[in-house]
Image (cartoon, helix red, strand yellow):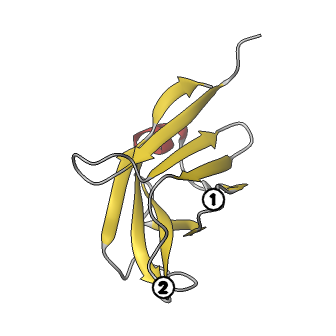
Amino acid sequence: APLAPNLVAALQKEATPPAFLITLDETQQALKIVALGEPAPAGKDYELWIIADGLKAPRSLGVVHQDNAQRPADLRGLTTAAVHSATLAISLEPAGGSPTGMPTGPVLFTGKFVTAKL
């Protein structure tokens, strides 16, 4: 049987290979994050953000480690259309993530979802 479509995003800097691949199972509201690049520098962590219509500010989807983790996706209040057109961003934050709930470090990688049957 065909698999349900997932949303997939490759987060990268312009003209460089992807640093992260992210899939979203919309049915389960679960993210799978695959780190392809270098780990964050000592004393820092990468943090994943969603920027979407319906949000007043970027929303953290959590600190990203090199362990290719699966985690719940906090999509509350977002329409399907908003999720499909959202931008994902990875910022470099202090160890443990942003202390303010907003990106405080530079945004290093960005990408958008595309629909794929995996």
Q: Nearer the viewer, residue 39 or 93?
A: 39
Residue bearing the label numbered 2: 42
Secondary structure of residue under mark 1: loop
> Horizontal placement of 97 versus 32: left or right?
left
Does any portion of residue 57 appear in the rendered image?
A: no
Residue type beneath disc 1: Asp
Q: Nearer the viewer, residue 1 or 58?
A: 1
Residue at (46% x, 42% y) in the render: 9
Question: Which residue lies most toward the left here?
Answer: 15
Which of the two marks, 2 or 1, is nearer to us in this view?
2
Residue density around tag 2, few if under 14, some if 14–19, many if 20 or more, within 10 Å: few
- Circle nearer the N terminus (2, 1): 2
Residue type beneath disc 2: Ala
> Horizontal placement of 73 versus 89: left or right?
right
Q: CA distance from mark 2 to mark 1?
A: 27 Å
Residue 104 screen position, x and y as percent: 37, 82
Residue 118 screen position, x and y as percent: 63, 25
In which quadrant of the rendered view does residue 103 lie? bottom left
Residue 76 screen position, x and y as percent: 62, 56
- Res. 74 mark: 1
Does any portion of residue 118 appear in the rendered image?
A: yes
